[in-house]
Amino acid sequence: MKRQEIVQQAGREIELLSRLHIIYGLKDEPCFAAQKKKIVDLITDGNINVKRDLDPLSVNLYRRYFG
């Protein structure tokens, strides 16, 4: 996968995490923890610099859930 595709995928996964929390109220469920782990793995494996590579909305959401 191209680097830009990985960065876009990370942004989409972070937005999905926020939907799981805000819309569906699944913050305390195993699927929420699994989504967080997926995001961490994607960012680590893709060598993504969160502040530099992600769009501002994704950075803000990332800070909310991982900061």
Image: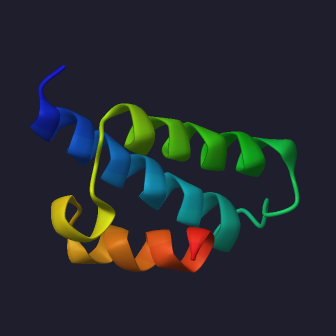
Split into 4 quadrants, where in the image is the N terminus?
top left
Color theme of the render: rainbow
Q: Is residue 22 left or right of residue 8?
A: right
Residue 4 spot, x, y in % from top left: 11, 39
Q: How many marks?
A: 0
Residue 53 lies in quadrant:
bottom left
Identify the residue at horizontal 71%, vertical 62% (top origin): 24
Q: Is residue 5 left or right of residue 46?
A: left
- Residue 18: x and y, percent? 55, 66
Residue 13 on image: x %, y %: 44, 47
Residue 55 image point, x, y percent: 20, 68
> Which residue of the protein is positioned furthest toward the top in this rendering?
1
Residue placed at 60% from the left, 71% from the top? 65
Query: In which quadrant of the rendered image does the C terminus lie?
Result: bottom right
Left or right position of 27 against 40: right
Query: In the image, what residue occupies the spot 23% across and 46% down?
Result: 8
**Left or right: where 62 falls relative to 54:** right
Name the foreground residue: 62 vs 30. 62
Depth check: give the residue in front, 29 or 33.
33
Residue sitting at x 75%, y 48%: 33
Q: Is residue 9 above or below residue 54?
A: above
